Structure formats: structure tokens, C-alpha cells
Amino acid sequence: MCKDRSQQHFVAWAKAHAIPLTTVELGSGMDDLQPLKTIVNQARVVALGESGHGIHEFLAFRNRLLAVLVQEMDFTAIAVETGFSESVLVDDYVLGKNVDRDTAIRSVFTWGDSVWKENQELIEWMRQYNARPTTSRRIRFYGLDLAGGVKGRLARCRRALDAVLAYIEQADSS
């Protein structure tokens, strides 16, 4: 039972606008996610937060949502909370370059030794999507953090900083 009026209003709004999901699992069809297309509409950037790392339902739903955005709404970039420098190897992998899969996957999403199955599934899905002969625009993988971290050490920051400086130099050339 909601204690105050603002909570009651929120609960009423949520009940009226909730979109029931059949499942959170990737590869389970997209019929139940079709209402999201109306919500996203013409947006070119969609941000999705998370309440904690490693939660299966969140990560699995993220993968399904990204599949809808890519396959049905022509999104071409996936940017996630991981280091920019570390993401370069995964971007190469999803583009089909000759990169060791396990090395690429272990390079992102974590500063520890654990690799979550859902993150592996996302990266594999991206590579498979890009490899399809009917794919006209390949999707790219980007990290948003400037961490450059390897097991808690900032060993690869240089690549990220060089990329930022090169962009600033190019943008400021006028």
C-alpha cells in the first residue's frame, strides 16, 4: 500500500503504461517488445541504466532490447559501461576481424576475472549479426569509460587519451 499521494500517482501511471514481457531471454522473438518502438520513436540515442552489475534479468533484457533497436530500428552502435581502450578489441571482434574471442570478451565489462554469460551472448550476437550476408550496416561496440583498466590498474589509458586528443585536434582545426 502506497503511503503518500505521489507514490499512488506513480503506481497508477506504471500500471497504466506497463508493457508485459514474455521473457527476458535473447532469441525468444520480439513481438512483446513492439510497443517499445513507439516509445523510442525517432530517438537516435537510447540510454538504459542498471541497478547492479551481474543481474541476469537485467543483462538478458538489455540484450533483447538492443536486438530490437538494431534489427528493427536501424541502430548501429552499442555503447556500454566499460573502458574505451578495452572496447577496441571487442569492436574488432564483432566486426569479424581475426581476434581471439576469449581475449576480447575478457577485456571488457569487468575489472576482475569473472565474465558474465549474458555479456558473452551480447558480443557473440553482435558478431553473428554483422556476419550475416543481409546485414547492410554493421553494428559497432564502444566503451564509455576512460578507465583503461586491467585488474584494477590503469594500464591502457593512453589509447583513450590519444583518441580524445586526436578528435579535439581534428574538431579544432577550423
Image (cartoon, rainbow, N blue to C red):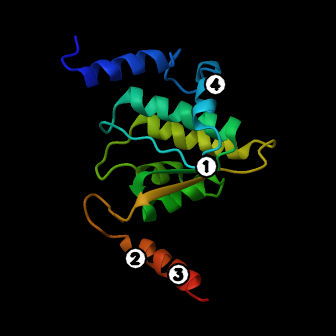
Residue 95: image quadrant is: bottom right
Which numbered marker is on residue 44?
1
Which numbered marker is on residue 34?
4
- Asked whether the viewer can see residue 87, the reply is yes
User: Who's the residue at 32% across and 62% down the image?
Assistant: 149
Q: Which callout, 3 or 2, points to the residue nearer the camera?
A: 3
Rounded to the nearest whole Å, what is the CA distance between mark 1 and mark 3?
25 Å
Of callouts 4 and 1, the N-terminal one: 4
Disc 4 on helix, strand or loop? helix
Residue 18 higher or lower than 163, as above or below: above
Q: Amino acid at mark 1?
A: Arg
Q: Amino acid at mark 2?
A: Arg
Where is residue 1? Give x, y as percent: 22, 10
Q: Which callout, 1 or 2, points to the residue nearer the camera?
A: 1
Q: Amino acid at mark 4?
A: Gln
Residue 97: image quadrant is: bottom right
Q: Residue furthest left?
A: 3
Which of the pair 50/115 is nearer the observer? 50
Disc 1 on helix, strand or loop? loop
Q: Which residue is mark 2?
A: 158
Around disc 2, counting alpha carbons within 10 Å, would you say few (fewer than 14), some (14 to 19), or many (20 or more)? few
Of callouts 3 and 2, the N-terminal one: 2
Where is residue 83? Give x, y as percent: 40, 59
Q: Quadrant of the C terminus?
A: bottom right
Asked if the residues shown at circle 4 and circle 1 are in contact, with their CB atoms under 8 angstroms apart, the answer is no
Rounded to the nearest whole Å, what is the CA distance between mark 2 and mark 4?
42 Å
Around disc 3, counting alpha carbons within 10 Å, would you say few (fewer than 14), some (14 to 19), or many (20 or more)? few
Around disc 4, counting alpha carbons within 10 Å, would you say few (fewer than 14), some (14 to 19), or many (20 or more)? few
Q: Which residue is mark 3?
A: 166
Of callouts 3 and 4, the N-terminal one: 4
Residue 115 higher or lower than 94, as above or below: above
Rounded to the nearest whole Å, what is the CA distance between mark 3 and mark 2?
12 Å
